[in-house]
Amino acid sequence: MKEKLYEFNSYLKVLITDKKIMNQIASNQNKLTAINETTFSKTLGNGMTVIVKTITRFIAGFIFLYGCYIILHGHLTPGGGFAGGVILAASFILLVLAFGAAEIREKNSYFFASIFESIGGLMFLFIALLGLFAGVFFFTNILSKGTPLKILSAGIIPLANIAIGIKVGAGLLSIFLALAATHYLMKE
């Protein structure tokens, strides 16, 4: 009987110790969660360090110009609308990550990205329908092919690349902003 009582007492001590440890763990987890939320909201609201912001100011324009170059020269060199659109989106995503995005600015950016995505899709559809309007087939090249290896040397392909670049760039930016906005949805 004494052995069972001793076992019971030692079991209670273990339970009490475990409960204290569990309370400490829960308290530490709450503190860590509060710290992480504060850090996350500061990162979204204020952006990153001064060094990152300075480098981003310098490099984002070059990334944007390189995306435009890839789109415009897509019929002459490897690249085109999709690759250039991804690079364009990357330049805007870099700006959002470096400088932060407050909730209102983020919602406005998502709205404008959605508008540009729709414009890109409508441009592509209009280019494809030009052949039907001219009395030929859907997506028929109705423009002059120009001089080989020049910017205006592929008929409607550069115009289609521009439309695809706008659509892909705005679409990827919208996806990024929608994923970033989940922080605000989780607060509500």
Image (tube, grey):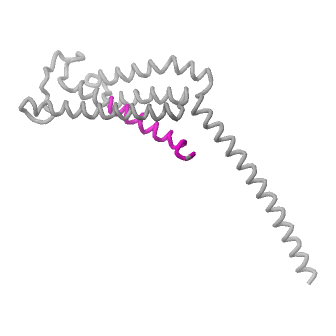
Q: Which residues are magenta?
A: 166-187
Above or below residue 89? Residue 152 is above
The one nearer the camera, 77 or 153, is 153
Residue 33 falls left or right of residue 151: right
Query: In terms of image quadrants, where is residue 76?
Result: top left
Q: Residue at 21% of width from left, 34% of height from top?
A: 125
Name the quarter where the N terminus is drawn. Answer: bottom right
Q: Residue furthest right?
A: 2
The one nearer the camera, 174 or 67, is 174
Q: Residue at 41% of width from left, 22% of height from top?
A: 64
Above or below residue 38? Residue 155 is above
Q: Residue at 67% of width from left, 46% of height from top?
A: 33
Image location (x, y in percent) of residue 142:
12, 26
Q: Residue furthest bottom?
A: 1
- For the stretch drawn in magenta, what is the main secondary structure? helix
Image location (x, y in percent) of residue 179:
48, 41
The magenta stretch spans residue 67: no
The one nearer the camera, 82 or 105, is 105
Residue 83 falls left or right of residue 8: left
Query: In terms of image quadrants, where is residue 11?
Result: bottom right
Image location (x, y in percent) of residue 89:
41, 30
Q: Residue furthest left?
A: 135
The magenta stretch spans residue 175: yes
Count the marks. 0
Q: Residue at 69% of width from left, 41% of height from top?
A: 35
Image location (x, y in percent) of residue 187:
57, 45
